[in-house]
Image: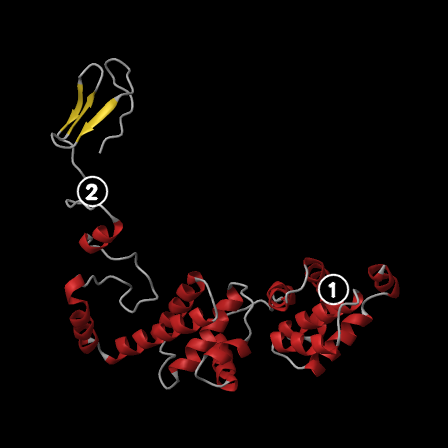
């Protein structure tokens, strides 16, 4: 449809589109501005969203999260039968891909990950399949490892232990596949930042914004020590939160166990990290914080 807003004859803005006669005319002077217009919209009409969804014959946009990328469009009345025919007509590699993508989607939903992360993980799986890295390996451990890789790439604070909890495979096998994929696919990941985990942990523990900001500050101040010793980011974040709460006088023995549980670490590890971080804080800083 032409988008003419002003009449070229009289300058009026009262332009009318006559879809019945396929014309565009001025309501003031009556001049026909254009004729034989082509309507690029659908040939059907719908009066509500439910009616529109039944009459539409196009599918959703292309997505790597679906084994056929969402290019097939089954008719509404034949959905069950069409799905059955599609599954029986697939070869073994297509069935494997379809199962892997369903597993990725299931775990991503359980971990409350965004569609961008799910899409990127699906692309990564397709690349691995193209490089023939899938054969001889469990699909569950591979997609779990790939999901963790994507979370690291997108700076999404999820640990291997959290992924193992929603996976069907043990942690050691997922870690083994993770290291193997990094090596064979030549993926380089930046070290995980502990401060990425702090907001989520504080939210789960229902802590104040002041403690969250102080914990992030502690991590940034001790960055050299953390990098040199190669501490796990989740445990470091938990220790920083514990130190921030201690400096404010808001921590007890029960809170230590809760922080460790949320971070997926042990109270002993948390205590060791806490002692090291505390060494980096000057006595003046501790005194000022208490005031």
Q: Is residue 287 visible?
A: yes
Residues packed near mark 1 inside 10 Å, few (<14), some (14 to 19) or many (20 plus): many
Instruction: Name which quarter of the figure residue 232 lies in.
Output: bottom right
Residue 46 lies, with reference to residue 131, above or below; the image says: above
Asked whether the beta carbons under mark 1 and mark 2 sit within 8 Å of each other, the answer is no
Residues packed near mark 2 inside 10 Å, few (<14), some (14 to 19) or many (20 plus): few
Going by the image, does 134 lie left or right of 211? left
Going by the image, does 209 lie left or right of 78? right
| Quarter that holds the N terminus | top left
Query: Which of 276 and 153 lies nearest the eye of the viewer?
Result: 276
- Relative image position of residue 20 (x, y in whole percent): 12, 32
- Relative image position of residue 68 (x, y in whole percent): 26, 67
The residue shown at (52%, 84%) is 171
- Mark 1, secondary structure of its residue: helix
- Relative image position of residue 66 (x, y in whole percent): 31, 67
Going by the image, does 214 lie left or right of 120? right
Q: Is residue 186 visible?
A: no
User: Which label belongs to residue 41?
Assistant: 2
Looking at marks 1 and 2 on the same chain, the residue that comes earlier in the sequence is marked by 2
Query: Which of 262 and 169 lies nearest the eye of the viewer?
Result: 262
The residue shown at (22%, 50%) is 52
User: Which label belongs to residue 218?
Assistant: 1
């Amino acid at each position: 449809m032409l988008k003419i807003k002003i009449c070229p004859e009289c300058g009026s803005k009262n332009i009318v589109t006559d879809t019945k006669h396929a014309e565009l005319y001025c309501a003031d002077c009556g001049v026909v501005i254009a004729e034989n217009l082509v309507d690029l919209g659908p040939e059907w009409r719908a009066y509500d969203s439910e009616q529109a969804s039944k009459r539409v014959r196009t599918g959703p946009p292309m997505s790597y999260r679906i084994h056929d990328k969402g290019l097939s469009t089954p008719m509404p009345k034949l959905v069950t039968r069409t799905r059955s025919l599609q599954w029986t007509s697939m070869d073994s590699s297509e069935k494997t891909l379809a199962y892997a993508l369903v597993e990725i989607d299931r775990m991503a939903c359980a971990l409350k990950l965004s569609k961008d992360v799910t899409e990127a993980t699906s692309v990564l799986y397709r690349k691995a399949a193209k490089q023939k890295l899938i054969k001889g390996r469990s699909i569950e451990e591979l997609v779990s490892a790939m999901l963790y890789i994507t979370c690291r790439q997108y700076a999404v604070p999820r640990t291997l232990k959290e992924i193992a909890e929603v996976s069907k495979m043990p942690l050691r096998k997922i870690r083994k596949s993770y290291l193997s994929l990094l090596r064979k696919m030549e993926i380089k990941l930046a070290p995980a930042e502990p401060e990425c985990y702090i907001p989520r942990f504080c939210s789960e523990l229902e802590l104040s914004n002041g403690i969250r900001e102080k914990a992030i500050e502690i991590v940034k101040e001790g960055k050299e020590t953390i990098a040199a010793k190669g501490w796990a980011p989740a445990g470091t974040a938990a220790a920083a939160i514990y130190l921030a709460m201690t400096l404010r006088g808001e921590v007890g023995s029960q809170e230590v166990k809760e922080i460790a549980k949320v971070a997926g670490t042990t109270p002993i590890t948390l205590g060791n990290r806490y002692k090291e971080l505390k060494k980096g804080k000057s006595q003046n800083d501790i005194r000022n914080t208490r005031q």
